[in-house]
Image (spheres, helix red, strand yellow):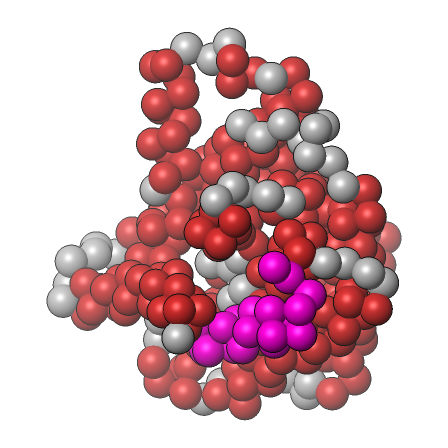
Amino acid sequence: MNNLVFSLNATMPVFLVILAGYIFNRMGMFKEGFVPSCNKFIFNVCLPIMVFADLAKENIVTSFNGSLVIYSAVITIIAFAVIWICARLFIKDRSIIGAFVQASYRSSVAVMGFAFMQNIYGSTGLIPMIIIGCVPLYNICAVTVLTFEAEDSRNDPDEKNKLKKAAIGIITNPIILGIIAGCIGSLLNVYSYIPPIIDKTLNSLSAIATPLSLIVIGASFEGRKAIAKLKPTAVCCAVKLIAMPLVFLTAAILMGFRDEALLALVIMLGSPTTPSCYIMAKNMKNDGVLTSSVIAATTLLSSVTLTFWIFIVKFMGYIS
């Protein structure tokens, strides 16, 4: 029961903020142009600052866990490749492939991971190792698939041009730049030198990233179109919340991951699809309707599925 209450407290506020965004938009509180402007602001400013701040404040040297970093990186690449191949083989509507792939493999570990680990162990634990291992790859893979599957790219037969676009997208991706800056900041211990004025400014911009993203997701949610995409939404949810945890947590247990390391993987694999998926999908001309539907659905369902995975690994004695 405690695990259920904990997961509900972590996920339901997220879902309710999305709902609030939808209601506010239906009430006419947002003018035309609000959503795209916010998308651009969140993608280029708030999310990179949030990732930078989370990493720069941690001492990634003293807490470094090479096996966890490598494992989280490897399973991210495997999941991404398998899902993209399967999507290409089985999805007839080519316009949703990029959004489907991104929403299926990418979790909100960078947003929810710190809160979960702090609540259970009283510290952020090994979540920074997961962020180093998977979050850069989340973004690199997302830029790649969204570039190749975007509407203008599908009509472009020049593969070299697509590769060039993907490479430029990766190099200039604000979130990837935020991760690199955060790792450098951690190594240099920059937060011991940053003046309080700058620190508070960065904290303020970082703090609005997630709630503003959720408001925008709700405001842009198109109910009738989302209903038409229930099948891919359901498949995304099954892949994200059931298939990936089942396969990769089993492998992790067999490889000897236990306690904080295993819990960090549970959070990585069992967390709902991250709100930044929607921001990237919209900014890179992919399907925002499917993305927002998956975010809302996985956020709601993860209160049950994530509780289940935590209960299973605790019941079997793999985490204390």
Q: Is residue 214 left or right of residue 175?
A: left
Relative depth, front residue between 278 and 266: 266
Residue 94's x, y, as percent? Answer: 66, 78
Quadrant, the C terminus: bottom right
Question: Which image quarter: residue 95?
Answer: bottom right
Q: Does the magenta-highlighted stretch encompass residue 314?
A: yes
Q: Is residue 200 something one can see in this rendering?
A: yes
Residue at the image point whose x is 72% and y is 69% from the top: 249
Q: Is residue 151 something one can see in this rendering?
A: no
Residue at the image point whose x is 48% and y is 44% from the top: 122
Residue at the image point whose x is 31% and y is 57% from the top: 215
Q: Principal SS element in the magenta part?
A: helix
Number of residue marks: 0
Relative depth, front residue between 96 and 165: 96
Q: Does the magenta-highlighted stretch encompass residue 146?
A: no
Residue 252's x, y, as percent? Answer: 78, 64
Report the span colored magenta: 301-320
Residue at the image point whose x is 59% and y is 43% from the top: 125
Relative depth, front residue between 148 and 131: 131
Q: Is residue 297 above or below residue 105?
A: below
Q: Is residue 91 above or below residue 138?
A: below
Q: Is residue 122 left or right of residue 265?
A: left
Residue 146's x, y, as percent? Answer: 65, 60
Quadrant, the N terminus: bottom left
Question: Which image quarter: residue 221?
Answer: bottom left
Q: Is residue 145 above or below residue 60?
A: below
Residue 223's x, y, as percent? Answer: 34, 80
